[in-house]
Image (tube, grey):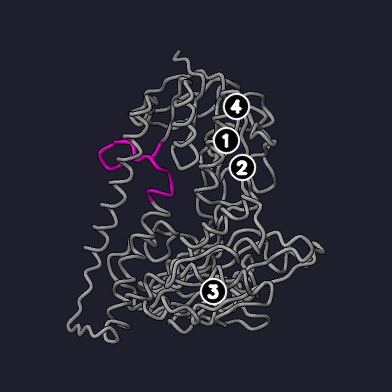
Amino acid sequence: MQQYEVIVVGAGPAGYVCAIRCAQLGLKVACIDKRVDTRGKPKLGGTCLNVGCIPSKALLDSTHHVQFINEQAGTHGLKVSGLEVDVPAMQKRKDHVVRTLVGGVASLLKKNKVDVISGTAGFIAPQKIRVDHAGGASQDLQGKHIVIASGSEPVDIQAAPVDGDCIVDSTGALEFHEVPLRLGIIGAGVIGLEMGSVWSRLGSEVVILEALPEFLAMADQAVSKEAFKILVKQGLDIRLNCKVQEARTSSDKVQVVYSTGNTEQSLEVDKLIVAVGRRPHTEGLNLDDLGIKTDQKGFIEVDSHWETSVKGVYAIGDVIGGAMLAHKGSEEGVALAELLADQSAHVSYESIPWVIYTWPEIAWAGRTERQCKESGIDYRTGVFPFMALGRAHAMGHAEGMFKIVGDASTDRILGVHILGPNASELISEAVVAMESELYTEDLARMIHAHPSLAEGMHEAALAVGGRAIHF
């Protein structure tokens, strides 16, 4: 039986990063993953690289160019006629991006001397894993420490069973080779909004049905309200407080029955995307046999050091819940690896950045104004609009805002919220500031380049003290 100091189950952003860091620290490591391509070769990188973060951003970037040509090129003095969109070519580019990055992960694991084992893993004892290979063979591995990083999978709902053709999940939403004339989406979360943006830019009439009465309830209210207006203006038909009762396929169409309050309505679409969230993927791991505790939703319970209820078995990433974000899982992977190597480690969950890659982008880190109110924190806010930034006007993207929430008594930065172009990049300054325990006054005193979008952060910090210069 092959012996390892660390066995990692799952090669997504949490798993492969943990495996690499363990190897860097001198531990003998194996990383097991069951995802393979059509040739039977490992497809490392998990959901993020293969059917999540990366392919969706590739399509968002491609369709952003389409949106620019259709809606803005003329204002830049660019005359474009006869534009044709080749969706299969767009998909081919997306697949190339994925293959490149998947190959990169394989190279990194090889470089760091991590043994990559392809197959389905299941516990046979607290420190023993059995790997079933595609051809029917199996092998047993023993590890001093075993890390579960098996990720998550799309949630399905009984009212709209996925058939992989007319009704698809987030994976299927990335694979259309024709633009649906009318596209329905259940769920106005990150996936629903991003996929809705992709296909709307290509000409689909997109209707998004959201069960909650509030749009993007997890974001700051001022930002979510403004984002709603912008996205509706772009053509997304976002209907709130809509509960889907039934979705049935008939003659290559999907009939969706949903209720709004006491009123029942119906919607006919060509394709329907079910994007109502994700759940932990633990099938086949034999957690119950081992006695590993999970919560009511199936997420693995861990302590402050990511150890499960079984000594020597750990869990990180989506499978433990919380913020189901690739970068959160990766940081847990690094921190756990360092703990296993008898070092100190910590993950600061309070300042994890969240991003929705619509255009304009939506990003935030830290507390919202509502959370401060609910916690009884005395706070101040500073808001600065992109329309007051010269660089935003030069780019032709002046919609959105910066918002900073600061502690009224200490002036410590509690949260930063951005709706605007490149918000995914701009939010990093806020994370650095919060991790460095800076005050809003510190941001207000720092010189930011002009003209730049980052000036909005500076002005929002000034606005916390009621002294913004340009608005």
Percent position of residue 165, x then y: 37, 62
Marks 3 and 4, how far apart at CA? 47 Å
Magenta stretch contains residue 246:
no
Taking 353 as reference, is 271 above or below it?
A: below
Highlighted magenta segment, given as a residue range: 34-50
Neighbour class for label 2 at 10 Å: few (<14), some, many (≥20)? some
Marks 1 and 4, how far apart at CA? 9 Å
Taking 62 as reference, is 263 above or below it?
A: below
CB-based contact (under 8 Å), mark 1 and mark 2 = yes
> Which amino acid, mark 1?
Ala
Residue closer to the observer: 374 or 180: 374
Query: Looking at the figure, which quarter contains the N terminus?
Result: top left
Percent position of residue 221, x then y: 65, 73
Neighbour class for label 4 at 10 Å: few (<14), some, many (≥20)? few
Report if residue 205 is visible in the image.
yes
**Comparing labels 1 and 4, the label whose residue is closer to the camera:** 4
Query: Residue 335 has which mark?
Result: 1
Residue at 66% from the left image edge and 33% from the top image edge = 305
Magenta stretch contains residue 47:
yes
Query: Looking at the figure, which quarter contains the C terminus?
Result: bottom right
Query: Mark 2 = which residue?
Result: 347
> Which amino acid, mark 3?
Leu
Report if residue 242 is visible in the image.
no
Query: Residue 209 has which mark?
Result: 3
Q: Residue furthest top?
A: 1
- Left/right placement of residue 89 relative to residue 292 reads left
Residue at 63% from the left image edge and 28% from the top image edge = 289
Give the main secondary structure of the magenta stretch: loop
Query: Mark 4 = which residue?
Result: 343
- Left/right placement of residue 154 relative to residue 444 reads left
**Comparing labels 3 and 1, the label whose residue is closer to the camera:** 1
Residue closer to the observer: 363 or 36: 363
